[in-house]
Image (cartoon, rainbow, N blue to C red):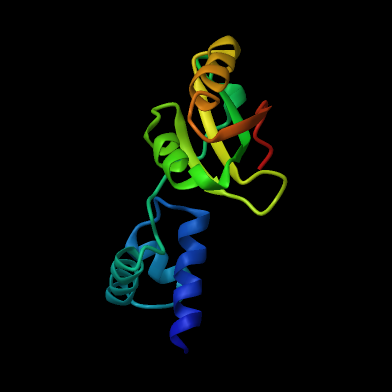
Amino acid sequence: MSTVSTEERILSVLEEDAQASCGEIAERADVSKPTVRKYIDRLEERGVIVGYSAEVDPKKLSSQSIAMVGMDVDSGQYVEATRELKSLDEVQALYTSSGDHMLMAEVRAGDGDELGDVISEQLLGVDGVTAAHPSFLQERLK
């Protein structure tokens, strides 16, 4: 077995179930528990694994609204703008994008009105953010 294929099998199991125990991962990836621990430690150290999270169905969250917001940023202010966006509590995740927008942010707030305020006041209030295009999430399908 190659190192890459072992790494890929372990990552595949983690992507399917971030709560899987080392024993479960070992069984499903066909490696030993110590091998799983070694690879996970190495992947975390290299920054390949950056965290573990729960997947949330926005429709079942009666107390929150979630949007994916595509943002355009002035290239001269990109570093400062991304730093400020990452510091906002309402921004759960921030991604670079090769699509229609430079950045994509997962934004959460108490309801649709509050989410609109976050977008118009906080996101568009960041120096360098020139546009914000929200897509409100309604129901998780997978």
- Residue shown at the point (39%, 60%) measured from the top left: 49
Picture coordinates of residue 94, whole percent (x, y):
50, 42
The quadrant in which the C terminus is found is top right
Rendered position, 129 above or below 77: above
Q: Residue 24: name its quadrant.
A: bottom left
Which residue is depicted at the point 61% across and 34% down? 68
**Residue 1: image x %, image y %?**
47, 89
Where residue 25 appears, as percent x and y from the top left, is 41, 65
Q: Residue furthest right?
A: 100
Residue at point 52%, 55% (across, down) = 16
Q: Would you place residue 62 above or below residue 85 in this image?
A: above
**Residue 98: quarter of image:** bottom right
Rendered position, 37 above or below 85: below
**Left or right: 81, with 36 as reference point:** right
Along the horizontal axis of the image, is 44 left or right of 140? left
Q: How many marks?
A: 0
The front one of 95 and 21 is: 95
